[in-house]
Image (cartoon, rainbow, N blue to C red):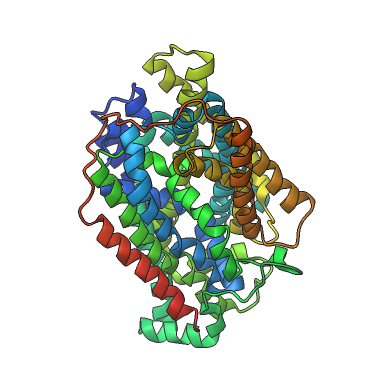
Amino acid sequence: MTLFTFLLFTGFVAAFASYKLRKDKLNTSDGYFLGGRSLTGIVIAGSLLLTNISTEHLVGMNGSSYRNGAIIVAWEVTSSLALVIAALYFAPKYLKMGLTTIPEFLEKRFDGMTRTIVALLLIISFVATLLPIVLYTGALNIEAIFEISDLLNVSKSQGIWITILIVGTIGAAYAIFGGLKMVAYTDTINGFGLLVAGLMVPIIALISIGDGNMFSGLTEVFNNAPDKFNVISRESGIGEGARDAILPFEVLFTGLMINQIYFWTMHQSIIQRVFGAVNLKEAQKGLLITGMLKILIPIVIVLPGLIAFYYFGDQYYNDPDSIYPRLVKMVLPTWLTGFFVAVMMGAILTTFNSTLNSAATVFSLGIYKRYIVKKASELSLVRIGKWTSFILAAFAIIIAPFVANAPSGLYQLLQELNGIFFIPIASVILAGFLFPKVSATGAKAGLLFGFAFYIVCNFVLKLNLHFVHIWGMEFVLNIIVMHLVSIAYPMQERFVMKDAGVVNLEPWKLAKGVSIILVVITVLIYFFLGRV
């Protein structure tokens, strides 16, 4: 029954997405990389959510909340603020310029070399951090639920390796043969499935704990360890112990929001859905609906960890990343387990194939067409994009098994590694929008300085600062470096943003109202849950 429900849902997703794409032209760069600029708000929201939420969240964040409490929720609820900024400020500008990639903006604003450096950093970050961790956490979950190693009579590590290979191959196939629109459709269906299946885990568990009453169950879990529900950490981000802290509250005011703004407004795998929007109205709808979902998603990726603490106590304190699969096996009936694993597979695939599609877009349009074959045909660009996806998928599959045994949990590892790339790129893009006097030479100096500064401070000198504080310092210093270098090497020509006339730029009439609601809800979460 478990295998049947798994195959049924997985087959439905593939069949539905293939049916929807049957008339689409995937042999042009816009058709393959941007879904023909035809994505609507619901599709954008579903794709954004599933590109973001994957097994590193389900496994990693629930493991962290089991061990450290609800302080980890900051990564989610502050995302809604960044999505407001994306909808009101960045989306109108991106769509006005008719962009295909973020590095394309950097070429328009600075020069081709800045574009190329950022493109290479993006591709390296995809292969070295996100893709391997997504594959590993997914394999960990599937191994724990399906016990692949026992079925194949191999060791657990071999079972995880085999699962990584299978999942990586299927994910690559989606990205290679379907392009962005295939990715977006599968994301949307799997997004709905993830919400349904993800909600089932805490709901069924709480009903069981409360003897049929979910709210009684929640009260019992809360009374078991009320401190676990506090969203404001009492950890210190400066001095002794700061490096081992999970998420001190003060980092919300230093580097955390810089990271959130980068991820939701500038990260290629996220913002590519906005580039593919049919118009500005649908782009804003998609971003703000995602903001609403990010407020609710802690019920799926934080609450189960708190419930697991009720069941298991400190029993798995040193193995937090095994908690979520254990809870799923414990609370879900057999017939639902297959559906859940299918959704888990979808969550892995959507993040994996979305990232592959974005990397292929950046390489094909930003590097191959610019430096290798300047007069490459549309068909040739699509073919190179497919080969790029294949090669990067192979690298990710090889690297994935080596991310096991992260000391602070897999989600924490992912965020720490992301700082190498995210903050330097964020500072340069923001400078491009906000500081008209920053020159191309200044931008390149900021990129290189930021890249080196974070590696030296966090990994070489190992300063007694939380890594998110280092992000904040790095961002400020990057801006200063860019301005100082720009004084010595000033801009030759002022940048003027031109309307490419690609899509309708009429905004969504409810955008500002929904944005205000999201900001208020975020503040209220901290006001009420920070007083526990």
- Could one spot residue 129 in this view of the protein? no
**Residue 94: image x %, image y %?**
36, 38
The residue positioned farthest toward the right in the image shown: 461
Q: Position of residue 509 (x, y in %)?
A: 20, 53
Pick whichever, 131 or 503, lies toward us. Answer: 503
On the rendered image, what quadrant is the N terminus found in? bottom left
Image: 231 above or below 464: below
Q: Is residue 352 above or below residue 223?
A: above
Asked if residue 303 shows in the view, the reply is yes
Question: Which residue sits at x=60%, y=66%?
Answer: 247
Relative to 38, is 263 on the left or the right?
right
Q: Position of residue 277 (x, y in %)?
A: 29, 39
How many circles with numbers are drawn on the protein? Answer: 0
Q: Identify which residue, 234 or 138, lies in the foreground.
A: 234
Residue 251 drawn at (x, y percent) = 58, 64
Residue at screen point 74% across, 69% down = 241
Query: Going 38% across and 57% down the picture, which residue do you hit?
Result: 194
Q: Quadrant of residue 128?
A: top right
Instruction: Indicate whether 60 appears above or below 230.
Output: above
Left or right: 224 in relation to 286: right
Q: Which image quarter: residue 249?
A: bottom right
Name above or below for residue 185 compared with residue 514. above
- The residue sitting at 64% across, 54% down in the picture is 473
Q: Is residue 215 left or right of residue 363?
A: left
